[in-house]
């Protein structure tokens, strides 16, 4: 018999030390495993080593009854399969009850992105007559120029930016660092922001820190703050809908591929460990299809 908390603590330690998993990944694992433990307790099962395939089937049925998406069920199943795989490796269980549980096929949705004309429209709507406006311009330019995740953007520090070389050092998922090129427009916007707006917004000694992007109080900008800023920008432009931060990452990848970049390069720029994660961006826009058709078909 093995205590639930002890089993979870050992697994989390394994994720941190051996797998070098991110804080975000570990928190998701904790939440999913705790949910499974609650289910076991409701079934009168206190020993994680006594779980059988029947219990797994019952748990999955419970998840589907909650109307959870296929993606969510697949994530939870994968998490618990990894948990029991670890217990099996440690000799705490004789078999993995989740090994026979098939992952539901995820709904294939193309990532939402902005067309190049929409991006130009968004940039044209930016006001650069205030520190906030200058910061917003630099923020939008960097996100679109590099395709970095919002969490990565919030972690960028002044020493990570090299404007002379046109690169930014990005601290990615799983503590994997990578250098990403920064285009001319972004370089100019960031340079202006550092020399003017950021200096003004962090003028207080209490606000002395190295993070590149700051809020109106001079504190480091958070992912929630970035989402708010982007939605405010989309409201002020003529574009419709909302602007989720990941849409800029999707737009970055889509525009690169549509303009001839090879998928391996885009994979490296995005920081994807698997090429399959990048292949979702190989869809093409209707405009691109029409352009290729007109250029290639003899009777177009």
Image (cartoon, helix red, strand yellow):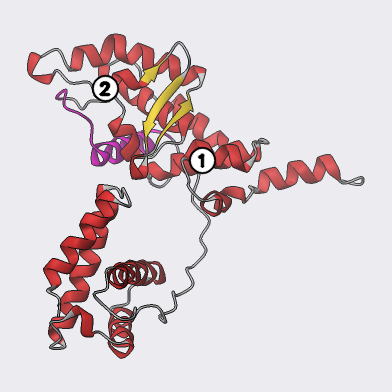
Q: Is 225 on the left or on the right of 123, as rendered?
A: left
User: Marks 1 and 2, how far apart in space?
Assistant: 24 Å
Q: Main secondary structure of the magenta part?
A: helix
> Magenta stretch?
217-237
Image x and y of residue 22, in percent: 29, 47
At horizontal 41% and vertical 72% (from top left) the residue drawn is: 70
Question: Along the line of sight, which residue is nearer the eye, 229 or 79?
Answer: 79
Question: Along the line of sight, which residue is nearer the eye, 69 or 38?
Answer: 38
Image x and y of residue 117, in percent: 56, 34
Q: Against 134, is 228 above or below?
A: below
* Residue that extends furthest to the front in the rendered view of this protein: 91
**Residue 103 figure quarter:** bottom left
Mark 1: secondary structure: helix
What crowding class fits label 1: few (fewer than 14 Cα within 10 Å), some (14-19), or many (20 or more)?
Answer: many
Q: Would residue 97 be counted in the magenta stretch? A: no
The answer to whether residue 233 is visible is yes
At horizontal 54% and vertical 42% (from top left) the residue drawn is: 267
Image x and y of residue 16, in percent: 25, 50
**What residue did someone put label 1 on?**
251
Q: Is 30 on the left or on the right of 95, as rendered?
A: left
The answer to whether residue 243 is visible is no
Q: Against 288, is 184 above or below?
A: above
**What residue did someone put label 2 on?**
132
* Residue that extends furthest to the left in the rendered view of this protein: 206
Q: Is 144 on the left or on the right of 55, as rendered?
A: right
What crowding class fits label 2: few (fewer than 14 Cα within 10 Å), some (14-19), or many (20 or more)?
Answer: some
- Where does the N terminus fall, quadrant-wise? bottom left
* Residue that extends furthest to the bottom in the rendered view of this protein: 54
Q: Would residue 222 be counted in the magenta stretch? A: yes
At horizontal 27% and vertical 68% (from top left) the residue drawn is: 90
């Amino acid at each position: 018999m093995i205590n639930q908390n002890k089993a979870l603590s050992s697994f989390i330690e394994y994720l941190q030390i051996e797998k070098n998993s991110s804080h975000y990944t570990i928190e998701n694992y904790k939440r999913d495993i705790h949910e499974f433990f609650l289910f076991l307790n409701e079934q009168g099962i206190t020993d994680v080593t006594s779980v059988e395939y029947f219990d797994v089937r019952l748990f999955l049925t419970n998840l589907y009854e909650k109307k959870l998406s296929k993606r969510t069920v697949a994530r939870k199943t994968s998490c618990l399969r990894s948990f029991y795989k670890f217990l099996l490796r440690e000799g705490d269980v004789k078999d993995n009850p989740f090994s026979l549980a098939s992952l539901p096929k995820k709904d294939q949705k193309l990532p939402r992105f902005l067309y190049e004309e929409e991006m130009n429209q968004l940039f044209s709507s930016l006001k650069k007559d205030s520190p906030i406006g200058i910061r917003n311009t630099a923020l939008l330019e960097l996100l679109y120029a590099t395709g970095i995740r919002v969490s990565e953007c919030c972690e960028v520090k002044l020493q990570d930016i090299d404007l002379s070389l046109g690169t930014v050092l990005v601290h990615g998922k799983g503590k994997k660092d990578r250098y990403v090129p920064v285009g001319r427009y972004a370089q100019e916007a960031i340079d202006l922001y550092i020399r003017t707006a950021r200096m003004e917004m962090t003028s207080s000694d209490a606000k002395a820190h190295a993070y590149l992007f700051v809020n109106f109080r001079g504190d480091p900008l958070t992912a929630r703050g970035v989402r708010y800023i982007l939605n405010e920008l989309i409201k002020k432009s003529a574009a419709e809908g909302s602007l989720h931060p990941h849409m800029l990452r999707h737009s970055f990848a889509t525009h690169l591929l549509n303009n001839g970049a090879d998928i391996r390069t885009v994979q490296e720029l995005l920081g994807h460990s698997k090429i399959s994660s990048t292949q979702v961006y190989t869809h093409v826009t209707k405009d691109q299809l029409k352009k290729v058709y007109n250029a290639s078909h003899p009777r177009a």
